[in-house]
Image (cartoon, rainbow, N blue to C red):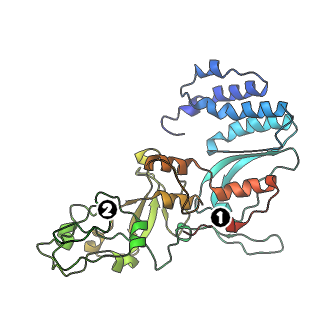
Amino acid sequence: MAGKRLGLVDQPLVHQAVADLAAGRDTREQLLAACRDERSLLAAEPMRYLHALHTAGEPEWVAMEEVPDVLPLWKQYAATLRRWGFSVWTGILNAADYGVPQTRKRAILLASRVRTAGPPPPTHARLPEPESLFGLGRARWVSMAEALGWGATDRPVPTVCAGGGPGGGPEPFPSGSRKTLSDARDRGTWTPRPDGIVLQSRREGAGWAARHGTRDNRPADAPAPTFTAEAHRWSWSLRSNNQANATVRSIEEPAGTLFFGHRANECTWIAEPRAAQPDAERRATPEPIRITAREAGLLQTFPADYPWAGNKGQQFSQIGNAVPPLLAGHLLAPHLNRPLNPDDFTLAA
C-alpha cells in the first residue's frame, strides 16, 4: 500500500508465485521480470519455506501477520495448508482488542497440525464489558495516556529553551535539538537566571517574541514563559501524518496505526483547546512536536528501554514495521504451550 502502491498491481503475479511454490516450482525469476515493484514477490517467500518444511514433515504450526490488504493472499496460503493437513484461521485483528494502545488492524494467519486454529479471545474493547455468566468480560481499550504514563493532571507540556548568554549556564536542551513532550515532562519547567539570559524559542515560531516579549522588553527576573500553568487549557492528540485526512486521536484514546518512513508519515503531538478561549489565548497554542522513538515504542508495547538500532529514521522504521509484542504474545502463546503473563508486557515507562 505504500508509495505508488505497485504491490497492488502485482498481486496476480504474487498469487501465481505462491501457487507455483506450493507445487514445488520456483517461477519467481520469470515472474519478477513482469513485476512493477521488485519487492512484490517477497510476499510469496513464506510459501518457499513452508513447502520445504512440509516436505520434511514440518512445521507443527504457522503464524503470519501483514497489512489488511494481504488477507486475500493469506486465504490462498490457507487453502494450501488445509490440503497439507493443517487447521487454519485467517482474519483481521485489531491490536487494541488485546491491550495494545493502538488501533492497529492486521491480517493474521494461524495454522496448526495439533490443535484447532482460531484467534485468541480479545481482552479489551472500546467500551468495557463486565464479567458475566457468558465470559470474563473485557477491559476498556488502553489509552496513550495510560501507556505513556501521563496522568490526568500530569500532562507533558512544551517549555521554552534558554539561549546561552554571557555568564549563562548550559541550555536545558542541547543546541539544535528537537524538544519533545517526553523531554518536557522529564525535565520539568525552567526559569532563567536573573542576569539577562536571552529567552528564545526554536519551536514557537516568529510570533513568539511579539506575544511574550524579548530581552529588551521583558524583565530579566521574570519567569520563562511556559504553558505549564495553562496545561488545563490544552488537550494533546497524536496526528498520524501531515496529510489533510490524517488520523488524529486524543491522548485519552489508543493511537491510530503507527507507520513511519516518509516525512508525510511522521507522527506528531498536537495541542487543541479544551474549551472556548479568547482569540489571544488561541494564538498561543503550542506547535506540533514530533513523537520520539521511545514514545512510539511504548505505543507498540515495547519496553521503554528497548535498544532500537541505527539512526533516527532506521529506528522509526523498525518500530513502524514491528508486530506489537503484546499482540504477538496473544497469538503465539497457545502454540508455545505457555500461559500469557500480562506482567511480561508492562506498558508504563
The answer for how far apart the CA atoms under marks 1 and 2 are is 33 Å
Label 2 is placed on what type of residue? Pro
Residue at x-position 71% and y-position 22%: 26
- For mark 2, give the secondary structure: loop
Categorize mark 1 by other alpha carbons within 10 Å: few (<14), some (14-19), many (20+). Answer: some
Q: Where, by quadrant of the figure, is residue 50 drawn?
A: top right
Q: Is residue 208 left or right of residue 104?
A: left
Q: Is the residue 9 above or below the residue 276 in the image?
A: above
Residue at x-position 77% and y-position 75%: 131
Q: Is residue 154 left or right of residue 24?
A: left
Q: Is residue 120 left or right of residue 178?
A: right
- For mark 1, give the secondary structure: loop
N-terminal of the two: label 1 or label 2?
Answer: 2
Q: Quadrant of the N terminus?
A: top right
Categorize mark 2 by other alpha carbons within 10 Å: few (<14), some (14-19), many (20+). Answer: few
Q: Nearer the viewer, mark 1 or mark 2?
A: 2
Out of 189 and 65, give the one closest to the viewer: 189
| Residue 320 place in picture, x, y as percent | 54, 50
Q: Is the residue 192 above or below the residue 331 in the image?
A: below
User: Residue beneath label 1, please?
Assistant: 345
User: Residue beneath label 2, please?
Assistant: 174
Q: Is residue 6 left or right of residue 243?
A: right
| Residue 43 place in picture, x, y as percent | 64, 34
Which residue extends farthest left?
216
Looking at the rendered structure, the number of numbered marks drawn on it comes to: 2
| Residue 311 place in picture, x, y as percent | 44, 48
Q: Is the residue 160 above or below the residue 63 in the image?
A: below
Residue at x-position 44% and y-position 47%: 313
Residue at x-position 54% and y-position 55%: 307
Label 1 is placed on what type of residue? Phe
Residue 291's tag is: none
Out of 50 and 3, give the one closest to the viewer: 50
